[in-house]
Amino acid sequence: MAKFDVIVIGGGPAGYHAAIRAAQLGLDTACIDKWLTPDGKPVFGGTCLNVGCIPSKALLDASYKFAEAQKGFQDVGIVFKDLSIDVPTMIRRKDNIVENLTNGVAALLKSNGVTTFEGTVVLHGGRKVEFTPHTGKTETLEADHVIIATGSVSIDIPPCPLVDDIIVDSTGALEWQSVPKRLGIIGAGIIGLEMGSVWNRLGSEVVVLEALEEFLPIADKQIAREAARQLKQQGMDIRLGTRVTGSKVKNKKVEVTWSDAEGDKTENFDKLIVAVGRRPYTEGLLAADSGINLDERGFIFVDDLCNTDAPEVYAVGDVVRGPMLAHKGMEEGIMVAERIAGFKPLVNYDCIPSVIYTHPEISWVGKTEQELKASGDKYKVGSFPLAASGRAMASNDTVGLIKVIADAETDRILGVHMIGAHTSELIAEAVIAMEFGASAEDLGLTMFAHPSLSEGLHEAALAVSGHAIHIVNRRRNQS
């Protein structure tokens, strides 16, 4: 029986970060993953690298470049004719990026001395791991510590079972070789909006059916309203309060039935994406004697330090509570590895940034206004429209705003919310400020480069106290 200090189950962002950090700290570490490419090749990297974060961003960036060339280049004096998109080439580029990065993860695991296994596992009590390779005989591995990082999978819904490449989940939507004329999307969450943006930019007529009455309730309401306005202006037909009740595939098209306040309706699409969220993945993982408990939503139950109910067994990433974000899982994996090695790090769950990679990008960290109102906290708000930014004007991309929320008494930053170009990068400045307990005044006293989009955060922080330079100050307090 092979014995390790640490066995990590799952090779996605949470898992491979945990494994590499544990190995760096001198622990004899193994990492096990079951992922296979369509041609049967074992790879590490999990959903994020293979069919999630990375490939979707490759398509989002490619499709945005195409849309910008179509509609924005003439404004800055660049004129050409007969622009077209080669979808198969775009998909091949995406696949090459994925292959490079997954090969990179395998190389990092190897160079850090992590022993890798490809196959499935069942976790038993006493931290015994029953491992079955894709080809070969089952063996038992043992560890002093086990870290579960098995991630999540797309949620299926009974009214819309997946059918070939016609009714697909987000994975299938990354593989189309041509642009569907009419595309339906069930779900106006992060995945639905990102996939809708890709194919809308390339020419699809996109209809988004969302069961909730409110658009993006996880985001600050002011930001969500602006996002809805911008996406609709781009041509996305977003319908709230719609409940999908069924689907039928006929002649390689899909007929969707749904209902709203007006009654039952039917609509036809060339393709349909089911993007109603993700669920933790634990199928076949936990033996009856594992000692691991699940919560009411199917997540592995852990405390704030990612300890499960079984001694020296931890769980991190999408399979546990909290937002299903790769960077959150990465930090949990590193925290657990370091705590196993005797250090005492913590993950600050109040400073987890979120990003939706539409254009404009939607990014935030900390509390929203609606959360603070509900809790009765007193706060003040400063905001800055990117239309007033010299750099945004020079870049021909002035859509959006940056908003800073601070405590009314202490001035400590409680939340920062952005919509605009490159906010996925700008939000890091806000995360750093909040991680160090900064006040809005601290940001206002910080020197930002000029001209830059980041100056918008500076101006929004100044506006909290009515000191913004480049806008008419409209300080808003909430008591």
Image (spheres, rainbow, N blue to C red):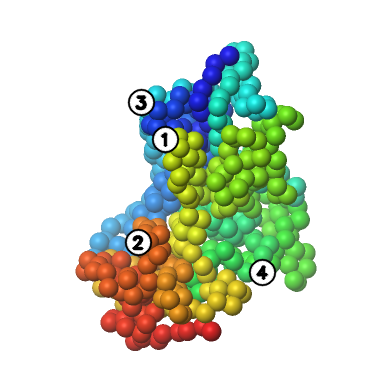
Q: Earlier in the sequence, mark 3 or mark 4?
A: 3
Point 41% across, 76% down: residue: 411
Q: Nearer the viewer, mark 1 or mark 3?
A: 1
Residue at mark 2 to residue at mark 4: CA–CA distance: 33 Å
Q: Which of marks 1 and 2 is nearer the N terminus?
A: 1
Q: Earlier in the sequence, mark 2 or mark 3?
A: 3
Dot 4: element = loop
Residue closest to the eye, 276 or 145: 145
Q: Name the residue under label 3.
A: 111
Residue at mark 1 to residue at mark 2: CA–CA distance: 25 Å
Q: Nearer the viewer, mark 3 or mark 4?
A: 3
Q: Mark 2 points at which residue?
A: 429
Label 4 amino acid? Glu
Q: In which quarter of the image is the N terminus?
A: top right
Asked if the residue under mark 4 is in contact with the one under mark 3, i.e. CB atoms within 8 Å, the reply is: no
Residue closest to the eye, 229 or 420: 420
Q: Looking at the picture, does residue 372 appear above or below residue 172?
A: below
| In this picture, residue 418 sits left or right of residue 293 | left
Residue at mark 3 to residue at mark 4: CA–CA distance: 50 Å
Point 63% across, 40% down: residue: 308
Asked if the residue under mark 2 is in contact with the one under mark 1, i.e. CB atoms within 8 Å, the reply is: no
Point 54% across, 16% down: residue: 2
Label total for image: 4
Dot 3: element = helix
Q: Mark 2: few, some, or many residues within 10 Å (few <14, many ≥20)?
A: some
| In this picture, residue 300 sits left or right of residue 356 | right
Res. 29 mark: none
The location of residue 223, given as percent across then percent down, is: 49, 70
Q: Mark 4 points at which residue?
A: 213
Q: Mark 4: few, some, or many residues within 10 Å (few <14, many ≥20)?
A: few
Residue at mark 4 to residue at mark 1: CA–CA distance: 43 Å
Label 2 amino acid? Glu
